[in-house]
Each structure stands twice: as structure tokens, then as C-alpha cells.
Image (spheres, grey):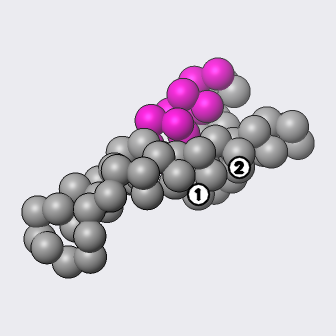
């Protein structure tokens, strides 16, 4: 997710690397915690905050790899 979001914001949208990285981190947090909130409110699956944290950490690794390539 982090690689895709970073490439989307920096390469496709044409933002600077700084703004693209901030946008990618923000969207990855929103997506990760959004899935957990969906599980909490609908009762499908189970709500676990650490799942959202692990997903954001994985996205940060992907963003870091992408920044190393760009």
C-alpha cells in the first residue's frame, strides 16, 4: 500500500516528494484505521487497534523503499 500511494502522489499527481510522502502517510493511516472502524461498527470481523498499527508500519516500510528508489 505504501509503495502504491507514494508512487501515486509523487509520480502521477506530480506533488513534491515531501507533500507526496505526507499525503501517502495520511491516506495509509485513514485506510488502515478505517477498516478497523468498519469492523467495529458492522460487527464483521473483529476490531483490533494493533492491526491498524501493523498496517501503517508496513506502509511506512513501503514508502521508505520507494523514497530510496526515487
**Residue at (11% x, 63% y) in the render:** 41
Question: Magenta region: which residues?
Answer: 18-28
Residue that label 1 marks: 1
User: Of helix, strand and loop, which one carries label 1?
Assistant: loop
The N terminus is located in which quarter? Answer: bottom right
| Category of crowding for the residue at label 2, using alpha-carbon neighbours closer than 10 angstroms: few (below 14), some (14–19), many (at least 20) | some
Q: Is residue 34 above or below residue 22?
A: below
Report the predominant secondary structure element of the magenta stretch.
Answer: helix
Q: In this view, does 27 lie to the left or right of 17?
A: left
Residue 41 appears in the rendering: yes
Extreme residue toward the bottom, this view: 44
Residue 58 colored magenta?
no
Q: Distance between the residues labelled 2 and 1?
A: 7 Å
Residue that label 2 marks: 62
**Residue at (87% x, 37% y) in the render:** 68
Residue 25 colored magenta?
yes
**Residue at (26% x, 70% y) in the render:** 46
| Corner quadrant of residue 44 | bottom left
| Category of crowding for the residue at label 1, using alpha-carbon neighbours closer than 10 angstroms: few (below 14), some (14–19), many (at least 20) | some
Q: In this view, does 66 lie to the left or right of 17?
A: right
Amino acid at each position: 500500500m505504501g509503495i502504491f500511494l507514494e508512487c501515486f502522489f509523487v509520480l502521477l499527481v506530480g506533488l513534491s516528494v515531501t507533500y507526496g510522502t505526507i499525503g501517502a502517510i495520511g491516506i495509509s493511516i485513514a485506510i488502515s484505521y478505517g477498516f478497523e472502524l468498519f469492523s467495529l461498527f458492522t460487527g464483521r470481523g473483529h476490531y483490533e487497534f494493533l492491526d491498524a498499527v501493523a498496517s501503517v508500519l508496513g506502509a511506512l516500510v513501503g514508502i521508505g523503499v520507494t523514497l530510496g528508489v526515487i
